Amino acid sequence: MPPIMVARFEIRPDTRLAAETALHEVASRARANRDVHWHAWREPGTSRYLALGNADGLEAAIAPYLASEIAWSSYELVTSTDLARRRR
């Protein structure tokens, strides 16, 4: 399984509706490919977001709404509720 990218970012508060519409469009495009997984969450009461997945296009979609740069990191799957333990 490919690494999952994690994006942490903040949008300008006055652009929340437009930014969340853009995030929804990224998710809709990702949904068309069954090998793509993508999720976005907003910290309640803030304009800070966390997105997880392997879909392309996030940065381009939300660039006009960002308050600062996206902080990217990458994680490899160890286990999950739908997987058996990985052999090493």
Image (spheres, rainbow, N blue to C red):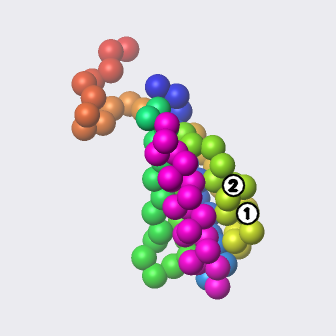
Span colored in magenta: 14-33
Which is the main secondary structure of the residues drawn in magenta? Answer: helix
Toward the viewer: 29 or 42?
29
Q: In the picture, residue 56 is in which quadrant?
A: top right
Residue 29 on the magenta segment: yes
Query: Can you tell which mark lies on residue 59?
Result: 2
Quarter of the figure that contains the C terminus: top left
Q: Secondary structure at mark 1?
A: helix
Label 1 – label 2 distance at C-alpha: 6 Å
Above or below, comparing residue 9 to residue 13 in the picture: above
Toward the viewer: 33 or 66?
33
Toward the viewer: 52 or 79?
52
Above or below, comparing residue 84 to residue 57 in the picture: above
Query: Residue 7, how many percent across, how many down?
Result: 59, 53
Q: Secondary structure at mark 2?
A: helix
The amino acid type of the residue labelled 2 equals Glu
The amino acid type of the residue labelled 1 equals Ala
Query: Can you tell which mark lies on residue 63?
Result: 1
Residue extending farthest to the bottom is 14
